[in-house]
């Protein structure tokens, strides 16, 4: 009898709180998006599952001694996991299109206006009762506009760990929604004629250029923005491993097994921050709203910058590729390509959009560095 | 409300400084590519096939020898697939025969 | 000895409670499969080939195209093996050409 | 001269204790079983080697600063390694046969009687002088009957870390001995006619069922047995990664590189607990004896349950598949298949035995949860 | 300077003791190979092909079946290469079909 | 205005110290050697990059909370990374050539004279003002002569962590320079007639011999030199995993993904010790000079030993293979082969040189054990 009552008291049924149930439903929602809708499944699947596990009553998976506790403090609180992912992403990135047409960097810069405008917006939300974002909070939220998951998680873990869960959910959800968010903005800001513009074929890029580029990039981060050095540095290490061609086995491991292992843990660790008290509040709604704004502003800034550049450039520039400047590699570039093909069936923009696309990765890492230096 | 204004001012400054620095940084990177890399590209051209458009190195490496017809490829690939399904280990043991570098 | 009896009682209770809970838990799982999953199976049938017996998905994927005879497979697999032994790298570089998802 | 004497004093020869020598022989015995007899080599080889390394005098590999010390405390004391292995095993498991014939779950439940009967037996052993098992010890020992390595290690690390070495050795040894222990019991409890029974072909299981099954399983663990949630949860995460089909690269890494890395470390870490004072005592003999009893009772319970079900079921059930309920995937299922073929050369039971086999994994994880909730 | 001499003496002793122990250790290993392993080699000969010179086990395993000519190998390997370049996934999914041992 | 000045104060430009700039150039030098000259790129590339990252002002990558700090203290300070690499190297090593001709072990022993003579030389350098090496320092430096990276890093992390950076740089640089350092010494110490000597074909080695060899080796380390047991033990574990043939998936992971992951981290962690104050001093020059001396003496000792053995041996021994006794697997064996082919185009020494080559690995692990036992 005593055993049965002890067992009953140890069940989830006897200990559930409403918040936990809701957060488990949120976790199920993320799993649904990941599995049924293929929204960034590599991160949303483990993240959704982590959200379920962390909200199990009694089990204490995120308390001292629990698996998710160890994962979070070993890998996310320290910043190690996002940096290793960034190394792997670097080893997967080809800067060729950007080196062939470096002006595309301006598009990657313009799209970061999404970040800084959102920062302003986050502070404006303080007018709403129940929301009180500090500058650190606002900075961590604004980085969602960078459309770069590891950068957002890295910055949030440094500036606003208590908002980490909501920020990661927003960042990855909107990255998955890029094909839905971007096209109307792109169509609204461009004429059909502009969307039809075909761009000149890219010049050949030599191996030496590709090897020196990551070194130059990290050197600039060192000189001008050391706060961005961990992110930019690990990214460039991965890229150098790939392009140097002398450590193929390391490069292959960095972009396959290592990034896979870290991705599982990163997802679980981020999911472990999706507890009811951290997520179920007005601030989360604010973050979700701001994230959508950030993406939209970033997309618009990129497109408008490209329109402007097209006016002054000798070589024609299709404004659609400006939208790829928000990063969200390679989804945003594919969206540019698709909208371009709609207007002109012979207009293959994919390679051209890869330039602003990877420039956007650099741009948001730089923006993160600025925020760390000035607000952190 | 004064506090609010203060925060707005800070956020506005951040926005301004941030965008300036982002453009400055990426702008300098343009200079780096145009001045440094472009020169390097001239001084150290790729040893072979400089006319080929930038594309995936690995695919090139694989596609450039032999000229078997698609039909033969399909026939063989079917056989290879079936062979692999039966001898699942083979690909793992091929990994073992990688040149083994001593670290 | 009293202590011993006490422990036996506890162990016996554990045995009883444990078996009851195990059966209850797995019994509920039967209900879950019969009630929930069975309905889902009807509402969301697999898009293709519903008549195929449950088996390893990957083997199916590999076995279903081409119909080369075992003799041809053996001949080719010998050649492939020898090719692989000489070009150990190829399988590793094929790994690199996996679709590279950005995380 | 001084150097030579210092060197002599640092040799193993000058410092050996008898217990260390014996434990090294135990380690060599495990290596022999692994290499020459192919008994669970993936774990017994690193475990045997770890046993040798941990008993080296002077070297202190399991003391503060030693490699095995770090491995044990980072991965086993925390429970991380068994949970990661469970995730990988989940990613290798196909629940199709179980979903097609869910009644098989009853066989997986019945076989857990091996666990709870052994718990009773362990307490009974306290009559023998020199043996004094607490309820926690008894629970950790009894789980050997679950025939599931990671579950046994996980539970032992929580309830009786000082018995971990002996429990792991017993669990993996008996799992390897399944083809020797089970057949006589199976033959004794069944008639030739029963062994000849052919079973109906399994129905097709849809992808949606396979995706929802792990979610339903983890939900039930949450509702009724949160103490089992870490084990069941990681198992279901692995299975969901596999069945969802959207994160193949994560699933592949979980069931290959990650599980391999963790297996090496788990084996070494478990081996590091095979020290003379923890292993060379009467209690170890008791554990080895109880382990054999646990396996036998589990096998018998499964077979008897299947006999009973066959009486009342419309579709015929071959009692041999009940033995697969102890888990020991996929060895026990293969044994059922082999004994079935002996009686009837056209009787292929393998797929049918996979149902109780994976049900046994769930059953022993549930049993572990009950023990954690009531005794832990 | 006395201290210096002391250190030299220590270093010299280390050199002497070190080389003696290294030679003793590796010398004993020679005995081990000559006495123990040589006997084992006689008592437990390899099951097959004892005449083969020591070489990479894996290459042997691969090279010993089939006798396709180099020309055929070249033709097939070209086709295989091209097939792989087009179906980059195949090698990864082959990995999945490894026999899945339960740990 | 305030923001801009705060940003300026956070730039590298405003905070650079000369030493950091120089160390970054050293890092670039290592990258150049790795990429353009293919000098041990697997370690020198991450090491060079780590040297750049650790010297970034403000960023604090090697301070508490920085990525390199975690990597160093988790993996190198504990000795875990070099030991895991040693396990992977063991899984890549074939002792067949050595078992077939065990006398080759004497060559591997002789070449260790490079280590102990250098120890003497390091103490002698104390005459130079500004250099003050303790016996521990001298031992850690001398191990460079072992021509084995992980051994050198393991010993340095135990005996002289403040010299670790310089020792690792010297060890890997000279290992890469083996094809330049060794040939003149080999030619000077041998006659053309000696270099032409062809050696008898090696006998067949059985599987049982290959399986028992690592066990015998670790047993000897246990009996006579427990201080060498971590290194020798992990090496033998890797080799046993390979030769046993029963754990191919573990062996494959140990020699591929695991060693790749650890190599990236090991390189970064070692690079993090290349800070200006630890590297830019007279002692580093001394270490670089001593390293070259150590390699040369080791090569000469091996060749002379082989000459001597050739005099007394029935089977002819080509003195060139003595040079392979310094280890530097498989580079030194290839050098022996190449010089042999110069003198006699039919003289293939590669397989014969693999014997002393792997003997050198054992020899330097033994030497490291002696130094740990007597000096550590
Ligand atoms: Na971005
Ligand atoms: Na079980
Ligand atoms: Na050596």
Image: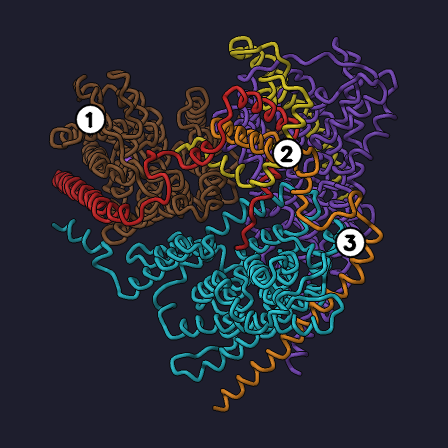
Chain colours: A brown, B red, C yellow, D purple, E orange, F cyan
Q: Nearer the viewer, mark 2 or mark 3?
A: 2
- Using a 10 Å C-alpha cutoff, classify the residue at mark 1 as few (fewer than 14 neighbours), some (14 to 19) or many (20 or more): many
- Looking at the image, do the residues carrying marks 2 and 3 touch, with CB atoms under 8 Å apart? no
Relative to residue F35, is residue A339 drawn left or right? left
Q: Is residue F344 above or below residue A363?
A: below
User: Does residue A64 appear in the picture of this structure?
Assistant: yes
Q: Please state which of residues E52 and A334 is positioned toward the viewer in this rendering.
A: E52
Q: Residue furthest bottom?
A: E2
Q: State the residue in front, A16 or A327.
A: A327
Give above or below for F329 relative to E91: below
Q: At x 66% / y 55%, what residue is drawn?
A: F236
Can you identify the residue that label 2 sits on?
E69
Mark 1, secondary structure of its residue: helix
Q: Is residue A73 left or right of residue B101?
A: left
Q: Residue at x 22, y 22 (%)?
A: A186
**Disc 1/disc 3 C-alpha distance (Å):** 78 Å
Distance between the alpha carbons at the discs numbered 1 and 2: 57 Å
Task: For mark 3, give the secondary structure.
Answer: loop
Indicate the secondary structure of the residue bearing disc 2: loop
Q: Which mark is residue D281?
A: 3
Residue A232 shown left or right of residue F342 in the figure: left
Q: Where is residue A250 drawn, in percent x and y?
A: 47, 46
Name the residue tied to disc 1: A319
Q: Chain of mark 1?
A: A
Q: Residue at x 80, y 33 (%)?
A: D179
Same subunit, labels 1 and 2: the answer reads no
CB of mark 1 near ligand 1 (< 8 Å): no
Where is the N terminus of chain C found, in terms of image quarters? Answer: top right
Q: Chain of mark 2?
A: E
């Amino acid at each position: 009898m005593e055993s049965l009552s002890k067992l009953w008291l140890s069940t989830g049924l006897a200990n559930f709180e409403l918040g936990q149930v809701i957060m488990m439903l949120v976790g199920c929602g993320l799993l649904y998006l990941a599995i049924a809708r293929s929204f960034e499944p590599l991160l949303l699947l483990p993240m959704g599952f982590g959200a379920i596990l962390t909200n199990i009553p009694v089990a204490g998976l995120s308390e001292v001694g629990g698996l998710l506790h160890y994962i979070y403090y070993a890998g996310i609180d320290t910043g190690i996991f996002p940096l290793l992912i960034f190394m792997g992403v670097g080893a997967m990135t080809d800067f060729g299109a950007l080196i062939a047409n470096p002006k595309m960097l301006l598009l990657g810069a313009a799209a970061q206006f999404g970040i800084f405008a959102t920062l302003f917006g986050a502070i404006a939300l303080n007018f709403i009762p129940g929301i009180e974002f500090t500058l650190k909070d606002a900075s961590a939220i604004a980085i969602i506009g960078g459309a770069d998951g590891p950068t957002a998680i890295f910055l949030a873990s440094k500036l606003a760990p208590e908002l980490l869960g909501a920020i990661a959910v927003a960042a990855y959800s909107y990255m998955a929604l890029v094909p839905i968010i971007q096209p109307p903005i792109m169509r609204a800001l461009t004429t059909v004629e502009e969307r039809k513009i075909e761009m000149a074929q890219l010049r050949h890029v030599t191996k030496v250029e590709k090897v020196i580029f990551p070194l130059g990039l990290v050197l600039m981060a060192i000189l001008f923005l050391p706060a961005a050095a961990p992110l930019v540095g690990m990214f460039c290490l991965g890229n150098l491993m790939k392009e140097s061609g002398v450590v193929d086995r390391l490069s292959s491991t960095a972009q396959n097994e290592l990034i896979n292992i870290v991705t599982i843990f990163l997802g679980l660790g981020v999911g472990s921050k999706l507890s009811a008290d951290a997520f179920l509040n007005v601030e989360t709604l604010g973050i979700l709203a701001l994230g959508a704004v950030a993406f939209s502003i970033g997309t618009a800034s990129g497109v408008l910058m490209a329109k402007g550049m097209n006016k002054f450039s000798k070589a024609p520039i299709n404004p659609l590729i400006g939208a790829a400047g928000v990063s969200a590699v390679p989804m945003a570039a594919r969206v540019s390509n698709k909208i371009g093909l709609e207007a002109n069936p012979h207009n293959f923009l994919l390679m051209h959009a890869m330039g602003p696309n990877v420039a956007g990765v650099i741009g948001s890492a730089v923006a993160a560095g600025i925020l760390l230096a000035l607000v952190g | 409300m004064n506090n609010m204004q203060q925060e707005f001012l800070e956020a506005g400054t951040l926005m301004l400084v941030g965008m300036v620095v982002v453009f400055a940084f990426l702008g300098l990177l343009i200079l780096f590519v145009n001045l440094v890399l472009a020169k390097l590209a001239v001084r150290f051209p790729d040893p072979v096939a400089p006319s080929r458009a930038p594309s995936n190195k690995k695919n090139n490496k694989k596609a450039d020898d032999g000229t078997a017809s698609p039909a033969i490829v399909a026939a063989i690939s079917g056989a290879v697939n079936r062979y692999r399904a039966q001898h699942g280990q083979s690909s793992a043991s091929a990994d073992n025969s990688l040149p083994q570098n001593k670290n």
